Image (tube, helix red, strand yellow):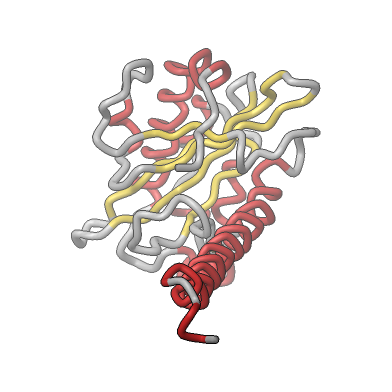
Amino acid sequence: MNASKSPALRFLPLALIIFVILLAGYSSRALLLDQKQNYDRAKLQQFFAEIPFDNDVLLDAYLIPADGEHPSLVNTELLGLQRDRLAYRARQDGEVVAVAVPATVDDGFNGTVDLLISVDMFGRIGAARVIEDLNDNELYGVLEVIESKWMEEFSGSSMRDILGVSWSKITADREYDQFVGASLTPKAVSNRIYDALVFFQSNRIELMRGGAYELQ
């Protein structure tokens, strides 16, 4: 009876096993991606806490390449990016009300620290935060925010206010050691945030109307 089975039927169990393994692998990758996206989605809430929005800001994102090669964006060098990063857009009734712009600061010791700065359409900062450098090239699961009272000083600031946020505002009881340590100066952070606002003003229309990043 078994000898009468066709070759196709004999190989069917093996093909089924391979299919199940591939399906399990795909499901695991999809679950991991979903977990990473939900993690970043929760972290993004603090960047738009003062701005009503009704879209998924994580997926309404604009990819900014680190190499500066972009057909529509200008002054990308102002961001100092070392890897491709996403800018995130908050919308209310379809209209962009704020954009979170990425930036990177050189720590002075051949290392970098990532920033994310949300800006409303009037050029005011909603939140500016240090993002832990995860040393990878992933776009999701990367928004590990370092808490800092000093960084909260930037909220509500415009370009003319930023450079006034100085080292004197960081004291031991305000957790400057937990901020970034002694290797990164507040002046470097302030300067990069200022540059990020210049970038935003230079590209506001493109950031508002440009297509959303599509997951590859």
Q: Nearer the viewer, residue 176 or 73?
A: 73
Q: Residue at x 52, y 13 (%)?
A: 205
Q: Quadrant of residue 59?
A: top right
Q: Quadrant of residue 54?
A: top right
Q: Residue furthest top?
A: 205
* Image coordinates for residue 106, horizontal then vertical, percent: 27, 51
* Image coordinates for residue 90, horizontal then vertical, percent: 67, 32
Q: Nearer the viewer, residue 117 or 157?
A: 117
Q: Residue at x 66, y 51 (%)?
A: 41
Q: Please identify the quadrant where the N terminus is shown.
A: bottom right
- Residue 166 shows in the view: yes
* Picture layout, residue 47 above or below residue 31: above
Q: How many marks?
A: 0
Q: Please identify the quadrant where the C terminus is shown.
A: top left
Q: Residue at x 62, y 63 (%)?
A: 35
* Image coordinates for residue 18, horizontal then vertical, percent: 46, 72
Q: Would residue 83 be found to the left or right of residue 197 on screen? A: left
Q: Would residue 44 be found to the left or right of residue 64 on screen? A: right
- Residue 175 shows in the view: no
* Image coordinates for residue 77, horizontal then vertical, percent: 28, 31
Q: Residue at x 32, y 31 (%)?
A: 78
Q: Nearer the viewer, residue 37 or 216?
A: 216
